[in-house]
């Protein structure tokens, strides 16, 4: 991907989608094994449905976290930095689901010669049900400015949230 510049980002810009699936039991089990998460709800249908009363094998929360990070990192490109990300697991995603990660730019601001981009994001299944809403802040280079440092560190004047602007209430 070419460099994504802060100057080219606008509020309302769509990010994604990043589509994964349909998620097979093998996909879920392989992720569980790689993460050393051996809870049977991620590979044993009878245990998940009969013992725990779940509707099917459950997709791992850590896998959903990975997809959200991948969405943002892919969009920010190799010259950007995913500074912060947060989300909530509000619903289960199950074997057989196809999941789409999406994002939308909600705010932009410059600080210390870098461009900060705040985004809403989430993960939806094939029926449009949102299971994992969240937010993220990425850092992009400003065209003609300095590169985003690697690793990214907070600017000397710590930016926790968007600085107040004239007219903000």
Image (cartoon, grey):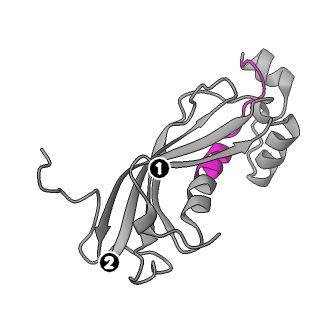
Work out which quarter of the rendered image holds the C terminus and state it. Answer: top left
Splitting the image into 4 quarters, where does residue 76 fall? bottom right
Disc 2 is placed on an element classified as loop
Horizontal placement of 122 versus 59: left or right? left
Splitting the image into 4 quarters, where does residue 21 fall? top right
Q: Is residue 149 above or below residue 52?
A: below
Of residues 74 and 93, the one drawn nearer to the viewer in this rendering: 74
Q: Is residue 35 above or below residue 78?
A: above
Disc 1 is placed on an element classified as loop
Q: Which residue is mark 2?
A: 113
- How many marks do you count on the picture? 2
Q: Which residues are magenta?
A: 54-68
Of residues 75 and 50, the one drawn nearer to the viewer in this rendering: 75
In x, y percent, where is residue 128? 62, 26
Q: Is residue 162 above or below residue 102?
A: below
Identify the residue at image location x=58%, y=61%: 73
Please tell me whether residue 72 belongs to the stretch shown in magenta.
no
Of residues 145 and 124, the one drawn nearer to the viewer in this rendering: 145
Horizontal placement of 91 versus 166: left or right? right
**Going by the picture, which residue comes out furthest to the right?**
26
Q: Which residue is mark 1?
A: 13
In x, y percent, where is residue 70? 63, 56
Work out which quarter of the rendered image holds the N terminus and state it. Answer: bottom right
Identify the residue at image location x=74%, y=43%: 20
Please tell me whether residue 67 belongs to the stretch shown in magenta.
yes
Identify the residue at image location x=85%, y=29%: 44
Splitting the image into 4 quarters, where does residue 161 fall? bottom left
Horizontal placement of 31 versus 121: left or right? right
**Mark 1: few/some/many CA within 10 Å (<14, 14-19, 20+):** few
Indicate which disc, 1 or 2, sits on the residue closer to the N terminus. 1
Horizontal placement of 169 versus 106: left or right? left
Q: Nearer the viewer, mark 1 or mark 2?
A: 1
């Amino acid at each position: 991907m070419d460099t994504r510049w802060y100057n080219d980002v606008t509020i309302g810009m769509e990010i994604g989608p990043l589509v994964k699936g349909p998620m097979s039991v093998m996909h879920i089990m392989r992720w569980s094994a790689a993460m050393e998460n051996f809870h049977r709800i991620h590979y044993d249908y009878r245990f998940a449905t009969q013992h725990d009363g779940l509707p099917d094998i459950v997709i791992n929360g850590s896998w959903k976290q990975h997809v959200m990070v991948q969405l943002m990192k892919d969009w920010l490109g190799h010259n950007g930095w995913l500074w912060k990300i947060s989300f909530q697991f509000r619903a289960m995603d199950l074997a057989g689901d196809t999941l789409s990660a999406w994002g939308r730019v909600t705010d932009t601001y410059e600080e210390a010669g870098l461009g900060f981009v705040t985004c809403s994001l989430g993960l939806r299944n094939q029926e449009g049900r949102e299971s994992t809403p969240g937010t993220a802040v990425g850092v992009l280079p400003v065209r003609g400015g300095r590169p985003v440092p690697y690793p990214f560190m907070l600017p000397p004047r710590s930016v926790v949230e968007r600085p107040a602007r004239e007219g903000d209430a």
